[in-house]
Amino acid sequence: MREVPKLTVDVNVKTNRSVTLLPGCIPGATPYHHSVMAGSTLTLEPGPFHHILILISGDVQFSTDGNSYIFRERVSFVPNPKLSVDIKGLTDCQLLEIRWDWQEGDDELAAEYKTQFPHIQIYRNAKQYRDRNKSEKTISRSVIDQRIIPRFAFGSVETYCSRIGIGVNSSSPRLISSGPMPSRHAAAAAPPALSRLWAGKIRLISSEIPG
């Protein structure tokens, strides 16, 4: 397992900024923390990568390819990698981006997958499943399934203890948020895997994850 520094990110930021997280530590993937204040717009230009965006908190409007999409809850949003995307804060917003590099052979996989962009997944609607290797108190969610983005899948792990994980396959980031968990009643209203991200701090840990 490759050792990567741990990093804690403050999501209580009250100014517009974009911060690169763990630069150069995760081959093929660069995480970013974007803070977009109410009324402000952040534009992400296309490049040889996917912008995989996860809304952590706030109300946001994504605009791409002549269309706009407003979200007031946790969501993952992946625009067409050939187009720019504008991120407008309708309220103060915090987002996590995983910039996933395009590699040789991805064109063929993308043609096979025929993914329609933007790809949108509301978190509360993400498919749930049980992992027999984990505790019965653990719920896993498939947030971005395989065969959507070449070599990439994104999921969360919810548990009623002190740790929640959000994992990405193929030797890319595993994100762990630690802290006291909400009660079961609170968790029913706010899914815990990202409610910990909402609560104020994210701890990022990278590890090799079997593909």
Image (cartoon, grey):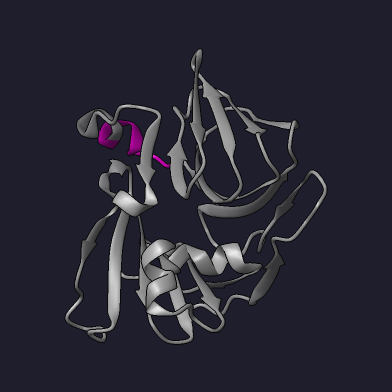
101 drawn magenta: no
What quarter of the picture does the N terminus occupy? Answer: bottom left
The residue positioned farthest toward the top in the image shown: 66
**From which residue to which does the magenta span run?**
103-109
Left or right of residue 20, residue 190 in this image: left
Is 206 displayed left or right of 199 in the figure?
left
The picture places residue 62, in percent across and down from the top left corner, at 55, 30
Q: Residue at x 69, y 66 (%)?
A: 9
Q: Position of residue 89 (x, y in %)?
A: 67, 36
Which of the 4 quarters of the picture holds residue 197? bottom right
- Judged left or right of residue 193, residue 59 is right
Judged left or right of residue 180, residue 39 is: right
| Residue farthest toward the right in the current orientation of the protein | 15
Q: Position of residue 208 (x, y in %)?
A: 42, 72
**Residue closest to the eye, 112 or 71:** 71
Figure check: 181 above or below 204: below
Q: Residue at x 65, y 34 (%)?
A: 90
Residue at the far front in the pictured view = 185
Choose top left, top right, bottom left or bottom right for residue 156. Answer: bottom left
Q: Residue at x 20, y 32 (%)?
A: 112
Examine the rendering and report whether any part of residue 130 can be seen: yes
Q: Identify the image quadrant of residue 104.
A: top left
Q: Is residue 102 visible?
A: no
